[in-house]
Image (cartoon, helix red, strand yellow):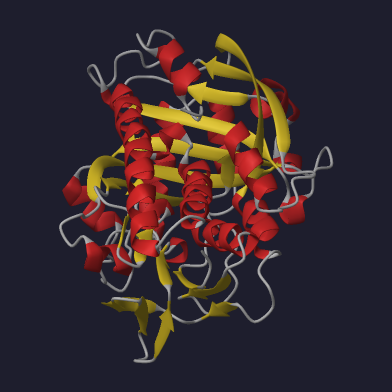
Amino acid sequence: MTGRAIISGGSIGGLFAACALLRAGWQVDVYERTGVELAGRGAGIVTHEPLISGLEAVGANTKDLGVQVNERVAYDSAGDRVRTLEYPQVVTSWDRMHRVLREIIPEGHYHLGRAIVGYQEAVDGVTAIFEDGRTEQADLLIGADGFRSAIRAQMLPEVKPDYAGYVVWRALAKEADLSEEVHRQVFDTFGFFIPNGTQIIGYPIAGPDNDLRPGHLRYNFVWYARVLQGDLDDMLTDASGQRHEISIPPPLVRKDVLQRMEQDAATRLPTPFVEILKVSERPFFTPIYDHHSPVMGQGHVALAGDAACVARPHVGMGVTKAALDALALARHLEHGAIPEALTAYSDERVAASLIAYERSQRLGGLIFDGPEGENADGCSHPDIETVMRDTAVVI
């Protein structure tokens, strides 16, 4: 079956859904709430074989997708190797992934500055309701509008993101800005620092505009740190006193919040990662939330990507999960009426996303198992091999 589909959300999940449906012969329109082209979000992305296959299935260009890393290495507080695991993998950037999918959308079918805030269903279709009061009719509405999804909020008002008790700090450093010693120690690996109570992950990604030339790459810095709810409230408050809900735009993070983070890093992190942080562009943080929807499709409305399920980033499955959602949705829609197709889609993808959701919680829990402050040098975490083996690995 084919028809007209409206997709709420123009990030990677929405683009995957659009590309899969376009490939299947649907007329598709993507509506993104922001008024400018999305860029620079999420920094590094770890790829998996199903993601590469998904890109190829929707006709995306996978040439020069990212940087090849061959080793996973755990470092101690001095920056010396503690464990090494051979694990070839391509790591890419959010920008690159978004661009290869965005190129597939026909001119005039990707709409910026158009926020969908709700919908009305009928027996034979669905009407999308926009923030400005306008409406659009379609055979199918897909909520790919992220973990704060307005579509999910209407479909499943009881499903809300839960704060996990910690945040992730992210930063990007230019390869050329790193000292020779730090470059030699950590740059070419998928690196870990795994003491009790915190965790570092880092790896190289392409430079701006997917620049893959040696010396022009960037280093993707990821740091998980426990933050109590009261402290999070303070971190989410900008210099004007406004408390932002869920997350805060990176430019609005107060200077004193950044200074406290840098002081904490200087006392807790290995020297190479402290240097990486110092030469990085302005770091930003994101509170870790997760949620899992028990239904991903009913009637003429479907959920996909982070709108349906957010697994904590330890599994590195966000983009791959969105790709698999999109391919499954298009496949089920090939046969029979839309409501029946969405029921079959939901049955398949709810079960699959639950696996990623639960595994990400287990990996997150390993960061904070045991008394904080023990194993300060990162050498003796009891689950160090599990963390190295299972982080950002397809399941």
**Residue 359 position in % (x across, y down):** 34, 28
* Observer-nearest of 319 and 29: 29
Q: How many marks?
A: 0
- 375 or 18: nearer the viewer: 18
Counting from the top left corner in percent of width and height, residue 286 is at: 38, 51
Near-viewer residue (220 or 100): 100
Q: Is residue 390 above or below residue 142?
A: above
From this view, report whether residue 141 is shown above or below residue 235: below
Residue 209 makes an appearance in the image: yes
Relative placement, left or right, of 54 versus 304 is: right
Question: Residue visible at 72% across and 44% down?
Answer: 206
Spot the residue most to the front. Answer: 336
User: Outermost residue toward the bottom?
Assistant: 133
The residue lying at 57 percent from left, 68 percent from top is 26
Q: Nearer the viewer, residue 337 or 255?
A: 337
In the displayed structure, does residue 177 sit left or right of residue 347?
right
Residue 100 locus on image (x, y percent): 70, 56
Answer whether residue 311 is visible to the viewer in this image: no
**Residue 80 lies in quadrant:** top right
Q: Looking at the image, which residue is at 56% across and 61% down? A: 21
